[in-house]
């Protein structure tokens, strides 16, 4: 093990979801209650966008992939929380979000949850935590 003391990592601040249709992604996440906090250009005309949920400090960066790398829909591993899974599911469906056919209920200790897809086809999970 290296004996050099390094600065500790103390939190996750952002996760990045690649997309080429940033305006569409912004509108999607804002419709879910996220708030755009950063929208700026960088590099050779690229755009960096960050959206955050109304509570919490970890955001989602919506940015194009490097160069001309293709974007394939992935399971992002991003888990969002709600205190009312039924209301969230109904709201997402009413907004036309691509959600699973039904809420998954596996029993204690696993909370109720459902998966949904963003406009690029990336999958995220929402879990009830009262």
Image (spheres, helix red, strand yellow):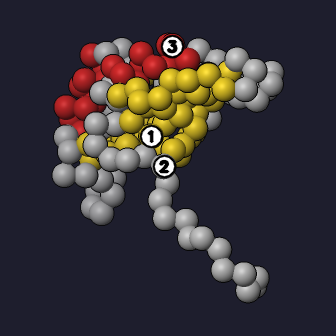
Say which residue label 3 marks.
23
Does residue 8 appear left or right of residue 2 in this picture? left
| Circles 1 and 2: CB atoms closer than 8 Å | yes
Mark 2 or 3 closer to N-term?
2
Q: Which mark is residue 40?
A: none
The quarter in which the N terminus is drawn is bottom right
In the rendered image, residue 37, in percent from the top left (x then y), is placed at 41, 30
Vertical arrangement, residue 29 with respect to residue 78, above or below: above
Whether residue 25 is visible: yes
Say which residue label 1 marks.
59
Q: What is the quadrant of residue 89 in the picture?
A: top left
| Crowdedness near tag 2: few (<14), some (14–19) or many (≥20) residues, C-alpha within 10 Å | few
Q: Which residue is drawn at 27% across and 61% down?
A: 108
| Circles 2 and 3: CB atoms closer than 8 Å | no
Determine whether the residue tagged by mark 1 lies in a helix, strand or loop: strand
Determine whether the residue tagged by mark 3 lies in a helix, strand or loop: helix
Q: Which residue is drawn at 62% across and 22% down?
A: 41
| Farthest-out residue, right | 68
Q: Residue 13 carries which label?
A: 2
In the rendered image, residue 47, in percent from the top left (x then y), is placed at 61, 22
């Amino acid at each position: 093990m290296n004996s050099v003391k390094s600065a500790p990592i103390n939190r996750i601040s952002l996760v990045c979801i690649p997309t080429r249709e940033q305006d569409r992604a912004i509108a999607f996440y804002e419709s879910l209650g996220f708030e755009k906090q950063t929208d700026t250009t960088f590099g050779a005309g690229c755009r960096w966008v960050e959206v955050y949920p109304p509570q919490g400090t970890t955001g989602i960066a919506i940015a194009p992939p490097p160069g001309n790398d293709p974007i394939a829909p992935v399971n992002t591993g991003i888990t969002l929380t709600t205190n009312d899974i039924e209301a969230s599911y109904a709201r997402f469906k009413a907004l036309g979000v691509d959600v699973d056919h039904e809420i998954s209920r596996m029993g204690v200790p696993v909370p109720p949850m459902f998966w949904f897809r963003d406009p690029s086809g990336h999958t995220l999970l929402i879990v009830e935590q009262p």
